[in-house]
Structures are given as structure tokens and as C-alpha cells.
Image (cartoon, rainbow, N blue to C red):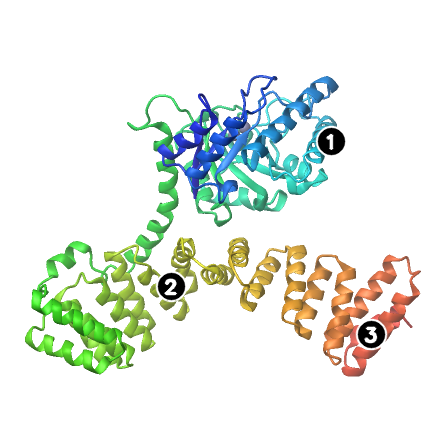
Amino acid sequence: MLVGSHLSIAGGMHLAVQEAQRLELDCVQVFTKNQRQWKWKPLADEEIKAFRAAVHDAGWHTNPERRLVSHNSYLVNLASPDAEMRAKSSALQLQETERCEQLGIPSCVMHPGAHLGTAGNAVDEEAGIRRLVTELDAIHRSTKGYSTVTCIENTVGSGTNLGGPLEHLARIRAAVKNPERVAFCFDTCHATAYGHDMSTPAKAKSFWQSFESVVGRAHVRVIHANDSKGALGSHLDRHENLGGGACGKSCFATLAHMLVFRHVPMIMETPKEGKLRGRDPDRANAAWLRALALAMFACVSVTMLGGCRPWAKSDAELTAARVGAVAPTAEESDRLRRAQSVADRGDYQEALGEFRALLTENPRLVDVQVAVGSITLEQGDIRAAQRSYEAAIQADPRNVDAHIGLARTHLAAQRNDDAVRCYRQALVLAPTDMRAIAGIADALERSGNRSAAIPFLERLAADAGADADAWSRVARAYLIAGRAAEASAAYEEAVTLGEVSEGTMDGLIAAYTAESRFAEASSAGSEFARRWPSAAASERAAWLAFRAADYDRAIVAYRHAAEQDHRSIKAWNGIGVCALNSWLLSDRLDGGAREEARRAFEQSLAVEPAQPQVEKLLRTYAP
Ligand SMILES: [Zn+2]
Ligand SMILES: [Zn+2]
């Protein structure tokens, strides 16, 4: 999760980046000029240089789209019916875009403006949207090749302002000529004040479901995390500290937990004056927001760990039980180190001999027990390994390595439930131990408990060094748990991270299909068939293209499948149906298509005569 704030540029734009650093924020939003004035001074070279240097010093230059946001001037109204006002607005918005590009700011937030007709009148709204789209197209045309994306912000929808209903946002993006230059900024305060209710987990979930189907979460490039002083549906645009307004905690918790937003800058436009809970308000609000993201994992782990309390002992209990461990003497440490390096060379027998000699003299050397456990486990002697780890735990119940080692012996013996218990015990002691997190995820998956593995898989994927496999794994778990949207997002992450495997691509297609995103599923399906050709892959690509209503692509893929496997009735029937379809779409004028359908159905019946439906199609349409 990336938390930032709208910060002042007084004294120089670069100071905002430095201030964000001082406040330990992940991202920042700025005005690139006085937001209440029509006039502007071009940016001086030194200003640009200083800003870019500050961004570089912060290490933000590698992923500026996650770090830097600009907010345009409040005066701009591209939806205005007044031609002069519109021209002025357009010139100013063009300048906003130019400045972003010069500064390397990839997102420029803009309000959609007001149509100034009759509030709520659908015709006036449509006219306003059309004017806005025309101006946006002109701006994007004259800034061709720029990387700055215009992010239309949702609004409280007061008066004749556009952008309250989600449909407005969707219609704007659907109408522009360069949709790749248009994305959205989602403001939680504006949404709540408009009347979008996210105040309980169920309401937040249902809101985001409709957002997904109307607008698409993937097009949200900036989030404004503000609470609302005004009540739900009040149409009042007054920002409040997080947790103190009408949005509700679940509004923010849902944002914090959605995987698709994990790299989207969340900018707080909350009050900056005075102190909040004794701290700088930005720090206090950021801490509140970040705690929600952490709470997700803590909450899940506590529930899970709570379920096995009789077994998993608390830290204090373990400390009290710690009876037999002793630290090795200097001489023992020396021998231990030597034996360890012998083991590292791969000479297990010699190392074991030395370790065991040490234990005979002093059986309470826990590190030695753990070392013996790891060697014997490596050698496949599960019983011996288990004995060593258990002895180590008995001497020092707080030894994380011993709990993890014991878990591994259980895994090796396919005692998955026992392994889960041991990993949980390790996690009580060391909640962030990645070996334990990876291990418990593994053990839960193997014991068929896939949905319980999800929070741990999420942790692995969220780790800084996570690779495509980690994402692919969590994606598969989501998919099996029926969480298709999250599965798609995680698979997409896996695809962007590295060499795409057959399994990942397969999962991505399944996730898109489960979400009924057939256009994307179809592209992925074609790509799959190209990389890993088979009749089955071509058939799937064809079926997906058909579902996406891309009949030309579908029939080509079915023909390909029939070439790959002459006896595939699915392929022949697919060709038949597609060809018949295009004959019907041609008002029955395309005789060639009907002929192709006839031949395909006949081929199919030659392979498998017992297909009454195919026979019926043939009789009805191509007698
Ligand atoms: Zn705004
Ligand atoms: Zn905002």
C-alpha cells in the first residue's frame, strides 16, 4: 500500500517531495502552479531540475506512476457551455499537462466540470460530457506521445457538476479517442458525499463490485483517501481526518486490502493544521491507514492461531517452560562451527560424528540438536530428525529453528496437519519468519486447506523479493476459492514479473473467464495457443473469441484446431456454428459461409454420427 499526501509547493516544488520523505510517505500530490489563478509562468529550467533531482534522491524515479501525482487548477471547466470559458479552460488544462510532462509526473488529476444547465437533466449532462470529451481529445492530440495520463476524479455531484454517478466516469472514458490517456482518481470523501455507501464491509464489497462492472478498478490510477465531514448523500465536499467522518472504517479497510490497488498512490487531502493525536496530522492519518493494511494479516493470523490455542503456546508460557537450554562454551562454539563447515562441505557423516560427540558431553546444546536434525532430515532419516528437533524444543521451547525443523520432518512424512501446527507455533514466536510463512502455506495447501493458505500466500507475494511464482501461487489459491477478480489481478502481476509459464497463462485465462472478461480471456487464449500449440488450445481460444463476440477470430482459431486434429468434432462444430452465424449476419447473402458451415457439419457427423443437434442445424439451415 502506498500512502501519500497533498503537500504544499511554497518555496519550490522540490520541497514537496522532500517533505513527503520527512513524513515517511510513499508518494505525493502537488499543484504545479497556483490553483486559483488563470495565469501562469512557464516552469524555469532550475525548477524542473530541482524537482527531478529531489525525485531521484528519494529513489522515486524508477516508478513515478506510483509516486507522483499532480492536481489541476480548480478553475478548469471543460464541460462548460460557454465557448470562451471552455477555450480558457482548455488552454489552462493543456498547460497543466505540459507541466506534468516536464516534471515527469505521470498522473494529472482533473474534475470533470459542470454542465451549467439544469441540475439532474440527462440531456444537459450528456451535452456536458460531450463537450468535455471534445476538449480532452484536443488536449491529448496536441500532447501526442506524452506519458501524462489525465485522471478524472469522481465528485460529490453537487449542482450541475458531473462525476457523481459512476456512469459519468465510464461514459467519458468510453467516448474519448485516446482512452490510454484517460484514467480515474477515486476520492472516498466525494463518493460517500455523493451517496456511494461503503460504510460496512458488505456495502463496500457491493460498491466495488458495481464499480468493477461499470468503470473497472484497473483504470483507477490515483486514490484520494479522505474522510467526509458531510453525511452520506449530503453532496458536501468537506474533507475530514481518516476515521472521523461518514465514510466508515470499512471504506478504507476495503481499499487497503484490495490487491489491485496495492501499487496505486493513496493521497490524503485531509486537514493539515495543528496536531492530530499529538502528531503531525499527515503522520497520524498515514499511520491509521497503514494499520488497516497490517490489521488484515494480524486479524487473519490471530483468528487462525486462536483456533489452535490449546496447542500453540504463548511467548510467555514458552519462556516459563524454558528449562534445559544452555549456551555453548567458547570451546564448544568452536567445535560447533568446525563441524558446521564440515557439513556445509557435504561431509555429513563426519559432521554428524562431531555433533554427536558434543551432545554426549553436553546434551543440552540446542543449536547442536538443531544441526543434527537438519542433517538427518537431509539424509532422509525422518525419525532421527524428529527426535533431535523434539529434544531441542524440549530444552528451548522458544527456538524458532527447531519448530520449523520439526514442521519440515512432519511435511516429509506427509503429516500435513502436524506440520501446520508446528509452523503456527513458529509464527507465534516469529510472526514475520518467511520460512515459516512459506512452510505453513505449503502445508495448508497440501492438506487441501487452500483458502486458509491464502493470507500466507499473500504475505509471500507481497514480500519485496517476490517472483512470478509467488504471485501465480496466490492467484491459483484465489481462483480455487472463487475470488476471480483478485485471481486475475495476481495473475496479471505474475505475468508482468517474468517469463510466463504455461500454468500461469492457463490460470489467467481461467480467471478472466470466471469474471466473464471474455475479450481479455480471448487475447490470452490466442497467446496461449500460439506459445503452446495444440488442438485443445486452439479450441479454447476459439470458444473464448466466440464468447467475446469476435467471430472472425473464432472461426480462424476453429479452423486451426481442425487442422491440428481432423477428428475433433468440437473444432468442426465450431467452424459450422461460426460460419452459419456469419451467413445469418450477412442477411443470408454470403453463400460461401453457408457452404463452409455445411461442409464442417458433415465432417463432424462423419466422425461422430450420433449428434442430433448438428443434424438438425444442417437440415434447418443448409439442406
Ligand atoms: Zn480533486
Ligand atoms: Zn480529491
For the C terminus, the image quarter is bottom right
Residue 608 screen position, x and y as percent:
76, 82
SS of the residue at dot 2?
helix
SS of the residue at dot 1?
helix
CA gap, disc 3 to disc 1?
A: 48 Å
| Residue type, mark 3 in image | Ala
Determine which quarter of the picture holds residue 455. bottom left
Residue 572 in view here: yes
Do the numbered discs 2 and 1 sit on residues whose CB atoms are within 8 Å? no
Q: Is label 2 or label 1 in front?
A: 1
Determine which quarter of the picture holds residue 514. bottom right
Q: Which residue is mark 1?
A: 134
Q: Earlier in the sequence, mark 2 or mark 1?
A: 1
| Residue type, mark 2 in image | Ala
Residue 529 screen position, x and y as percent:
66, 68
Do the numbered discs 3 and 1 sit on residues whose CB atoms are within 8 Å? no
Give the numbered dot on residue 441: 2
Give the numbered dot on residue 470: none
Q: Earlier in the sequence, mark 3 or mark 2?
A: 2
> Taking 400 as reference, is 611 left or right?
right
Give the residue at x 79% y 78%.
604
- Badge 2: residue crowd in 10 Å (few <14, some 14–19, many ≥20): many
Q: Which residue is mark 3?
A: 600
Q: Nearer the viewer, residue 473 or 465?
A: 465
CA gap, disc 3 to disc 2?
A: 49 Å
Give the residue at x 20% y 72%.
340
